[in-house]
Amino acid sequence: MSASLARRERTDLCDLALTLGPDAPTLCEGWDARDLVNHLLIRERRPVSALGNVVPPLAGLTDRAMAHGRDRSFGVEVERLRRPSPPLRLAPRLDELMNTVELVVHHEDLRRAQPGWEPRSLPAEDLDALWSQLTRAAALFGRKLPEPTVLKRVDTGATATARKGPDPVTISGPVVELALFLFGRDQTRGLGFEGPPEAVERVREADLGI
């Protein structure tokens, strides 16, 4: 059985991080490659310390964990990230549910912060796996959208609702680009927006950073 998309993205992200080094920029404002690796490790192996990412009063807890991680060897931390945590190694399906979208987006955060980046051409089965996980959590990922919004993948025409409501904005594009948009990334290509003009403008300009 071939490795899942989540597992392959984990490996490729780690390989790229080692190639670029700890000080390489990322699309995450204020984060370099070291911070990105540290964030992924905390999220997976110290989930209580990661709560500050979604619960503002606990931000100090996450900040302290991030600061502590910067004192560790980058190479050692990357190799820790390369292997899923023990619970996820025992439950690969859980790894897919938790990490497919997260690892694709953060791999792109590292790739697209480098000069000369180009979109990747993922196999159809990988796009289907990413779309499946993206649509399962579309309402969560789209919680900051200011208007009703529907996602449409241009290769198959499949749609998913990111925020319910009448007269939605439809965002069409490649699956990876749709994921990046929902995570608040500006470095996207090939997205189209249709809907009421004022609603489209609000969606395009919304701060969706995750």
Image (spheres, rainbow, N blue to C red):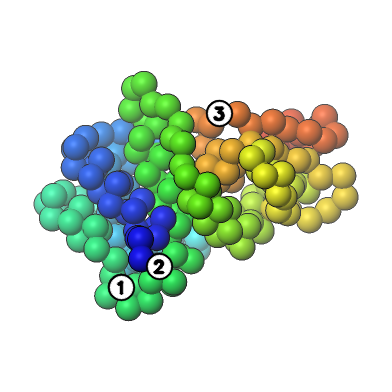
> Measuring 39% from the left and 60% from the top, which residue is drawn there?
4
Query: Mark 1 touching mark 2, by CB under 8 A?
Result: yes
Badge 1, how many Cα within 10 Å: few under 14, some, many 20+?
few
Query: Residue beneath label 2, please?
Result: 95
Cβ–Cβ under 8 Å for marks 2 and 3: no
Give me the residue at 19% from left, 37% from top: 19
Q: Label 3 sits on what residue type?
A: Arg
Q: In this image, 198 relative to 140: left or right?
A: right
Q: How far apart are the alpha carbons under marks 2 and 3? A: 28 Å
Measured as percent of width and height from the top left, residue 127 is found at: 53, 48
Q: Amino acid at mark 1?
A: Arg
State whether residue 139 appears in this view: yes
> Is 3 on the left-hand or right-hand side of 161?
left
Q: Secondary structure at mark 1?
A: helix
Quarter assignment of residue 5: bottom left
The single residue placed furthest to the front in the displayed view is 1
Q: Vertical placement of 194 versus 137: above or below?
A: above
Q: Badge 3 is on which residue?
A: 189
Q: Secondary structure at mark 3?
A: loop
The residue identified by callout 1 is 89
Question: What residue do we see at 40% from left, 39% from top?
Answer: 109
